Image (cartoon, rainbow, N blue to C red):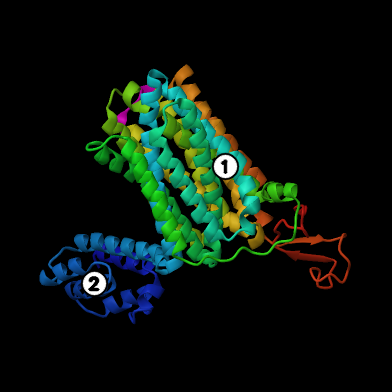
Amino acid sequence: MPVATRRIRSRLATEVPSNFMTSRGMAAPGDWSGACSARGTSGARWAWGMNHVARISDELFDPICNFLRRSEWQLSLEYMESYVWLVTLAIKAHAMFSILADRTYRHLFLAQIVALLGTGMATIALGLLAYDLAGDRAALVLGTVFTIKMIAYVGIAPIAGAFANRWPRRAMLVSLDLIRAVVALSLPFVTEIWQVYILIFMLQSASAAFTPTFQATIPDILPEENRYTRALSLSRLAYDLENLISPALAAILLAFVSYQVLFYGTVIGFIASALLVVSVLLPSPQPMAPRGIYDRTTRGLRIYLATPRLRGLLSLNLAAASAGAMVLVNTVILVKSDLGLGDTQVAMALGAFGGGSMLAALGLPRLLDSRPDRPVMIAGALSLVVVLLASGLWVAVAGPVWSVLLIGWLAIGVGYSVVLTPSGRLLKRSDHPEDRPAVYAAQFALSHACWLLTYPLAGWLITAFGAVVGFIVLALVAGAGLLGGMLFWPHQQDASLPHNHDDLPPDHPHLAGRLTHSHPIVIDDYHPHWPRA
């Protein structure tokens, strides 16, 4: 039997989900090799196999299938193998995008995309506005703007999360979108730098309230973990597309209009997001016990920091922020100053980072269906440390090289997405529905606190000491995050843990007649502290 034939059979048997076949009245992949063997000559087996693959791909690749039929399958086994790759990749994409059949989630996902595209254009417009107002001091102005953004995220998100369950979610999300639209509409008319600072604080405060509430709504819409995992990957894709599409769209628009028009694009994005949100019904907030203002505003942080897996997530966020800051802050310096290349190459380098993240997001749902989150995320953080160290050593020995930079940024994008994409799954397992907005807000605030550290560190290191020191020090910071993730998030902590409740009467419903009992732990009023193993 030709080697290519065996490879094809093996790939069809292992990579195409059986339920995809059986749901369409076809033989499961595991039955194919026997059926092929029964077909006699290798030519007949090949024709049968191609026909079977064509039946799978009819829904996805009708034009290709028709072409192949017209050519009467006159292709080599090697071409057939490549085609099988395309088919199986399309089937995987079909599985991930199938959650868009849910109307509510589809509208929210589209709302996220249009809002992100608008935000991306606003970021570019802000840079040009800062240059108009401050000239050579534009970098200082933008640095202050990003600092204000992080302060708003860290300070406002927990407060907003405390009240998210007291207001109807749809009304809250629509109101915040409209606030953002009004602020964006005001930006083209500013004449002083201090006005920019005030408006940016208002805009980012609204975003700090919007994003955690939006994220906390998704698991209520898609409660099944496999569907929620795919939603997380799509969300990651949306952020990556924003990094790729917004600059391209802005470049096209700037060829015909002034940068102030980009702010109007941002306004349109926020209004479109509001219309999409208002077009669907969202789950009502879960009722919660009356609590004081201090308890409400700190509850999410207390649950987060008392949960070992979430402390581990925070440490891994530091690793992701270290590598991400190196890319986002220093790409323009590495490409234009160190390599002497142009704006196009800057865009290509950032595109490699976004492309790596997208590749990881596409492959993660299937991986997380069969692997626990912890080893996957730790492997992603380890890859970030290795790439940063290797890049620093390469620059020290051979100097900066364009192709190496592209490969490094692609690898960082993959590791970055592997660390961040599963975080929503951890949050969902670590809270009750009534606490979910507060816990998501805590994640939002604490993860951005990591960026508040790494953003200025990345810029200062490469400015003061050069690229080698920048790579090495940020690798050490990422390594500290990796070590913290491994220590704070032990292997066994996801399992049911035996514990007792000395503060509860023996007949309390939670105890079910057993003073010492065992179940997966979620920090709440009954479990304010994590039991000791």
Q: In what quadrant of the picture does the N terminus appear?
A: bottom left
Dot 2 corresponds to which residue? 54
Residue 413's x, y, as percent?
A: 41, 42
Q: Residue at x 52, y 39 (%)?
A: 202
| Vertical arrangement, residue 442 with respect to residue 187, above or below | below
Q: Residue at x 38, y 52 (%)?
A: 114
In the image, which disc is placed on residue 201?
none
**Residue 422: image location, x then y, percent:** 52, 53
Q: Which residue is mark 1?
A: 447
Numbered range of the magenta stretch: 396-403
Image vertical order of residue 195 relative to residue 21, above or below: above
Alpha carbons under labels 1 and 2: distance apart: 46 Å
**N-term-proximal mark, 1 vs 2:** 2
Tell me the amino acid under the disc marked 1.
Ser
Residue 146 visible to an observer of this rendering: yes
Across and down, in percent, residue 279 comes to 44, 64
Quadrant in which residue 81 is drawn:
bottom left
- Image coordinates of residue 350 in percent, x first then y, are 36, 37
Tell me if 336 is positioned left or right of 321 in this view. left
Q: Main secondary structure of the magenta part?
A: helix
Q: How many other residues sit within 10 Å of disc 2, few (<14), some (14-19) or many (≥20)?
A: many
Left or right for 27, reference 199: left
Residue 483 or residue 450, whichever sits in front: 450
Q: Secondary structure at mark 1?
A: helix
